[in-house]
Amino acid sequence: MLQRRTLYALKALLELTQAPEALCSASQIAQGQKIPAAMLEQILLQLRRSGLVVAQRGRTGGYGLAQPAGTICLEMVAHAVGEPLQQPEPPPDPEGGASDQVLGVLQRRLRCSLTTALRETTLEELFLDLRSWQAILEDENALML
């Protein structure tokens, strides 16, 4: 489904979403989300170039969200890190039967569904889900909303 780079980018953005008023260092994000530091640096650079995060140098510097979490859709994140969302369709098999046609239609529908889900889901929605899961995992008697 989603490539590792996109998943790491989403984890980094979720880390930043948890501290909207503060800047987080790359090492804090890498450690907190268990992301390889070298890969995270590349991802943060791509996210900054795409206008999704801001960076501030210096001892008190770090990274923060460049815009509200509710305005960042997952499609923007995937695009920022270079994930090809539109996979090329394999050419139709000239000798394929009806089942091949049915499976081809299914693959097109799945690609369309993924694109729609990424376009319609925001970082804020993931953050709310994250908070629910944190509450559940910390208190097994908690009710998930």
Image: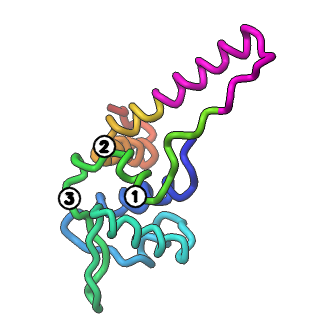
User: What's drawn in magenta, residue-wise?
Assistant: 90-112
- Displayed quadrant of residue 51: bottom left
Which residue: 22% across, 64% down? 66
95 is higher (above) or lower (below) than 16: above
- 3 and 1 marks in contact (CB < 8 Å): no
Q: Residues within 10 Å of mark 3 (few under 14, many from 20)?
A: few
Q: Position of residue 16 (x, y in %)?
A: 32, 63
The numbered mark, 3 or 1, whose residue comes first in the sequence reads 3
Which residue: 42% across, 75% down? 28
Q: Which residue is mark 3?
A: 67
Q: Which residue is mark 2?
A: 122
Numbered badge on residue 58? none
Residue 114 located left or right of residue 87: left
Q: Residues within 10 Å of mark 1 (few under 14, many from 20)?
A: many
Which residue: 41% across, 76% down? 26
Tell me the CA gap for discs 3 and 2.
12 Å
Tell me the CA gap for discs 1 and 2.
15 Å
76 is higher (above) or lower (below) than 90: below
Q: Which residue is mark 1?
A: 80
Q: Amino acid at mark 1?
A: Ala
Tell me the CA gap for discs 3 and 1.
14 Å
Which residue: 44% across, 51% down? 78
Look at the image and say whether residue 105 sits in the magenta stretch: yes
The C terminus - image quarter: top left
User: Which mark is nearer the camera, 3 or 1?
Assistant: 1
Q: Position of residue 121 (x, y in %)?
A: 34, 38
Q: Amino acid at mark 3?
A: Gln
The N terminus - image quarter: top right
